[in-house]
Image: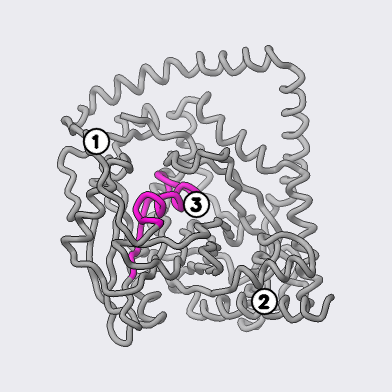
Amino acid sequence: MDRLSPLDALFVEAEDQDPHTSMAIASIAVFEGPAPSHEDFLAAVAGRLPLLPRYRQKLRTVPFRLGRPVWVEDPRFDLGYHVRRTALPAPGGDTQLRELMGRLMSQRLDRDHPLWEYWVAEGLADGRWALISKVHHCIVDGVSGTDLYRVVFDSTPEPTPPAADHRVAGAEPAAAWLAAHAAVDLALTPVRGAAALSGVLADPGRAARQVSDSVRAAARLAPALWPATESSLTGPIGRQRRYTWARASLQQVKTIKGQLGGTVNDVVLAAITSGFRDLLLARGEQPGPYMLPSLVPVSLRAPGEENIYENRISAVVASLPVHVADPVARLAAVRAELSALKDSKEAILGAELASLGDYYPFPLASPGIRAAFALPQREIVTVTTNVPGPRGPLYGLGRRLVEIIPYVPIATTVRTGISIFSYGNDITFGVTGDFGTNPDLDVLARGIERGIAGLRKASARGK
C-alpha cells in the first residue's frame, strides 16, 4: 500500500470538488496498419504490466478523511476491462478521430478500478489505427506519462519479450485498517516537521538563500493573482469536451529560434498566443494586455527520474501577449515574460507550497484545497504544457508509430488547454475545449499553425 503524495492527492481533490471535471491526461498514438487483433494486443499489454505497478492498483479513500488516499492492489483486476476496442466511421480522418477523443475524454475514469484505459481505434484513413491512452493525473505527469511510451512500445520493430511477473495480489485492506494506518501517519506529522527544521538548522546559509528566493518569487507571483481581463475564454464549463489539434515541424521551429532568438518553448508559446489572438478577434473581442495568463507546468525531475510514476511538477503563471499584433514583437514579449519568470524562481515557490502537504495534517488541508477549487479561478485563463517526447521511432507490435497527439484536462473556469508534444521531427498541439463554449475551437488550432507560418516567414526575411 502506497499513500498518494500531496500533489497527487491535489488532482484527486480537484476532481472531487467539481462534477464537470475529469483529471485524466491522455494521448493519441497513430500507427501504420494493420491493427493487431484484440487477443494479440491484450497479450502485449499483459507482458508490460509487471513494469507498471499502478496499472493493477486502485485508489482507496481513507475513512473520515484522516489521511491522503492510498494505492492498493486490485484483487479483481481484469485487463479486459481496461483495454477496449472501437472503430471510426468512414472516412476515418482527423474529424472522426477528434470527435471520438472528445467523447472519451468527457467521461471520468471509474474509481472502482485502476485509473487507466486503453482504446484501440480501427478504421483510420490509409489503413492506420490508433491507441488512445487515458490515465489519471494522480498517477503521472507529462514527463512520466511520456516514459510510458518507452515501457509499452518498442524501439525496434521486434517486440520486446514479456516481463517476468511475480505479483501476488492479496485481499484489499479493511476500512478500519486504513483508518488506523492514517492515524499513525497523522501522529508522525510533527516528527516530519521537526526533521525538516533540523535540516534547516544544519545549513542555515542554504535556508536563508531558499527564503530569499521564495520572497522574490512571491513578489513576482502576486500580480499574477489579480483577475484576468474578462473575455469569452473564461467562465463555467460543462462535462463534455471538444478536442482538436495543430501540427508543426520541429525543424522549422528550431530554424525560427535560430533566426529570431529564444528557445523552442518560446516559439511554440508565441504560436499559441497567435492562435488565441485569432480566436478572440474571430469572436469580435479586442485582445488586450493581461487577457491570457496561462498556467505553465515546470518539471522538477532530475535526470533518470522519468520512470517514477507520480507528479513531480511545479508551475508558473505566464501572461501571454495576445495584444501584440506583430509576430516578431510577440515572440520577443514571450521571451521577456518567460525570462523574468525564470529569474524570479516562481517555480521554486510552487514546489515549496506543494511540499507543505508532507508537514500539514491532511484533515486540515483538505477542506482548504476544496474551498480553493470552489472559488472562480479568474487569474488563470488557460494551461499550456510542453513535453519533449521520443526523438527516435517507436513501434507497437511491429507497427511503426507515426504520430503522437497529446491531451491536457481543463477544470473550474478554464475553458481551453493546450498540450505540446514533440515526436521525431514533428510537434503536435493538442487543444482541449469545453464543448458548450468552444464551437469554434478549430479557429484556435488553425491560428497556432498560422502563428508558426508567420514566424517562419519573418525568420526567412532575417528579421
Seen from the viewer's position, the closer of residues 55 and 194 is 55
**Pointer 3 local density, CA inside 10 Å: few below 14, some 14–19, many at least 20:** many
**Quadrant hosting residue 21:** bottom left
- Residue 370 visible to an observer of this rendering: no
Name the side, left or right, on which 134 lies relative to 353: left
Image position of 180 (left or right of 68): left
Q: Position of residue 57 (x, y in %)?
A: 27, 40
| Residue designated by label 2 | 451
Say if the magenta span includes residue 458. no
Which quarter of the image is occupied by the C terminus? bottom right
Residue under numbered circle 1? 73
Indicate whether 252 appears above or below 112.
below
Q: Position of residue 91 (x, y in %)?
A: 32, 87
- The magenta stretch is 130-155
Quadrant showing the N terminus: top left
| Residue underneath mark 3 | 142
Q: CA distance from mark 2 to mark 1?
A: 47 Å
Question: Pointers 3 and 2 in contact (CB under 8 A)?
Answer: no
* Among numbered discs 3 and 2, the one appearing first in the sequence: 3
- Amino acid at the residue labelled 2: Gly
